[in-house]
């Protein structure tokens, strides 16, 4: 599904080449004012906002501030007239006229990619890698940096046996296997998250003498039935 982009501008902004170019790549929602844009954003949350102050015949600083407050965390691209003096814009990107559609698309793509959060969906587990959060069986858990690296490794390699040496190299950046108590503790913590405290290893299984394997086939079979 295409990402939603909110385009705010004057009465003719919907007829511009910018909109036509944007609609080839994104789900574009158009609003004639900042106030209406905020209302529209409630029904269709945008991944980014483009404020076309040029078509509004204004610098758009006040609108920019209201958008920043009303849509926290949503990146804003501010299009301003040619010859505009340096201003205190709260937008992530400020582009001065003349602005080609190609340039706007390039900036928008980079802005959305930088803002995007990486998510892994594996069996009954969903992990937000960027924020180090995992949702298991409806419960959300914040992970420590090491536990996050460990869980990410298994979620990216479901059904594969990962040996202890590889885990130590990836998570703790060491080849030393003389004392793996730290790994054992982290595996226990991870099982508390994936299986529930005190639960039997249904998903994260021990492969004796080798390492561990995340098995989600049972969960996938149950989901299909």
Image (cartoon, rainbow, N blue to C red):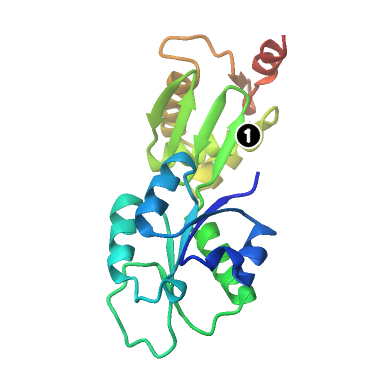
Q: Residue at x 70, y 27 (%)?
A: 159
- Please provide percent x and percent y for residue 62: 27, 67
In the rendered image, which quarter is residue 59 located in? bottom left
Quadrant containing the C terminus in the rendered view: top right
Nearest to the observer: residue 23 or residue 95: 23
Q: Is residue 43 left or right of residue 157?
A: left
Q: Is residue 6 above or below residue 181?
A: below
Q: Position of residue 179 (x, y in %)?
A: 45, 34
Residue found at the far bottom of this picture: 83
Seen in the picture, residue 70 relative to 188 is either above or below; the reply is below
Give the x, y percent position of residue 167: 56, 39
Residue at 28% across, 63% down: 65
Residue drawn at point x = 37 percent, y = 67 percent: 91
Q: Assign the N terminus to one quadrant of the image.
A: top right
Residue 37: x, y in percent?
41, 53
Q: Which residue is mark 1?
A: 163
């Amino acid at each position: 599904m295409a990402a939603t982009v909110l385009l705010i501008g004057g009465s003719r902004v919907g007829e511009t080449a910018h909109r036509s170019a944007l609609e080839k790549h994104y789900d574009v929602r158009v609003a004639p004012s900042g106030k209406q844009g905020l209302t529209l954003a409630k029904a269709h949350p945008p991944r980014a906002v483009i404020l076309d102050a040029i078509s509004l015949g204004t610098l758009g600083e006040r609108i920019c501030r209201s958008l920043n407050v009303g849509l926290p965390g949503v990146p804003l691209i501010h299009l301003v007239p040619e010859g505009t003096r340096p201003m205190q814009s709260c937008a992530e990107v400020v582009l001065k006229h003349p602005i080609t559609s190609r340039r706007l698309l390039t900036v928008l793509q980079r802005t959305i990619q930088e803002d995007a959060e990486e998510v892994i969906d594996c069996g009954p587990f969903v992990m937000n890698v960027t924020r180090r959060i995992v949702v298991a069986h409806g419960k959300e858990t914040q992970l420590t940096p090491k536990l996050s690296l460990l869980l990410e490794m298994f979620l990216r390699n479901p059904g594969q046996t990962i040996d202890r040496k590889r885990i130590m190299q990836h998570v703790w950046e060491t080849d030393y296997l003389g004392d793996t108590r730290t790994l054992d503790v982290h595996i226990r913590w991870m099982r508390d998250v994936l299986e529930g405290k005190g639960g039997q290893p249904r998903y994260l299984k021990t492969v004796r003498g080798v390492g561990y394997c995340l098995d989600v086939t049972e969960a996938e079979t149950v989901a299909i039935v």
